[in-house]
Amino acid sequence: MARQFLVLDDHPFVHTALGQMLADLEPGGRITLTHRLEQALSSLRQNPAPDLILADLHLPDANGTEVLTRLRQQRPEAPIAVFSAHADAPTILRCLEAGAIGYIPKTHSSEAVINALRLITSGCPYVPPEVLSLHANSRARLEAHLARPADPRHLGLTDRQIDVLRLILRGLPNKLICRQLRLAEGTVKVHVSAVLRALGVRNRTQAVIAASRIGLDVPD
C-alpha cells in the first residue's frame, strides 16, 4: 500500500522541494500539499491518517507549537515533523515536547534534508546535530526526550486498548485475550481494530513491528 504524506507550508517552493524529495524516497507515495492549517485539518478529517505530516511553524492562520497541537488533536496517531527556518534549541525542544518526531531546519542542505527525511520516514527521531553541541542544558533535555519511550496514550488509545495491545505484543490470539481480560470476543475484535488503526497497520505482525519502531512503552 502506498504511503501517504501531508506537507503543510505556505511557500510553493517548499511544496515543490519536499514533494520531490518524498517522491524520491517513497516512489508511488501519495503527497498532499496544503498552505494553511485549516486546509491541512480539513484534509486530515476527510482522509486516512498520513504516514507523516511535515509542517512549518509559521503559517497565515497559525504560529508556533499551536500548529503541532491542533494537528495532533485531529490525528494523534500521525507522526509529525517540523520543517522550519528556525533552528534554535528552545524552539526545537518546545516542538519535541509538543509531540514532534523530528525537526528539520530549512537552512539544511538538500542532502541533509533528504537524510533527515529518510530517518523520520523509517520511524527514527531527528534533530539537527549542531543543536546538541551548542547548549549543554538543552542537549541533556533533548537526549532525555529522544531516549524516552513513546506513551501509547499519545496514539489516542484507551487503557483497555493498551491492555489489548500489550497482549498482542505477547503473541496472544483473540480467544486468549478474551480469557485474560474477561471480555467478549466481539469487544476484543473492536479493540484490536482500534489498535491496528492507531498504529496505521493492517495485521498483528505489522503491529509488533510498528510498536518496536516507534519505541512504544507498554507496561505489564
Image (spheres, rainbow, N blue to C red):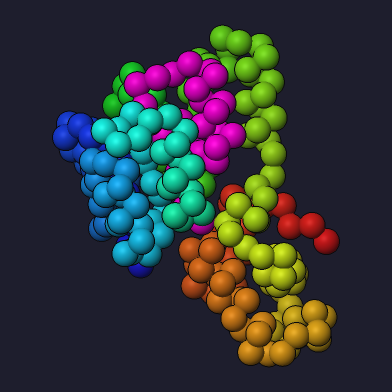
Q: Looking at the rendering, in which quadrant would you find the N terminus? A: bottom left
Please determine whether, in this image, residue 135 is positioned above or below residue 140.
above
Residue lying farthest front? 61
Q: Is residue 118 left or right of residue 220?
A: left
Q: Nearer the viewer, residue 20 or 154?
A: 154
Q: Residue at x 64, y 18 (%)?
A: 139
Q: What residue sits 48% from the left and 63% below the top?
A: 200
Which image quadrant for residue 58? top left
Q: Say which residue appears at 48% left-offset and 16% top-offset.
A: 88
Residue 83 appearing in the image? no
Find the magenta span and give its range. Answer: 77-103
Q: Quadrant of residue 164?
A: bottom right
The residue at 33%/64% (across/down) is: 47
Q: Is residue 94 magenta?
A: yes
- In which quadrant of the rendered image does the C terminus lie? bottom right
Q: Quadrant of residue 105?
A: top left
* Residue 103 spot, x, y in % from top left: 46, 31
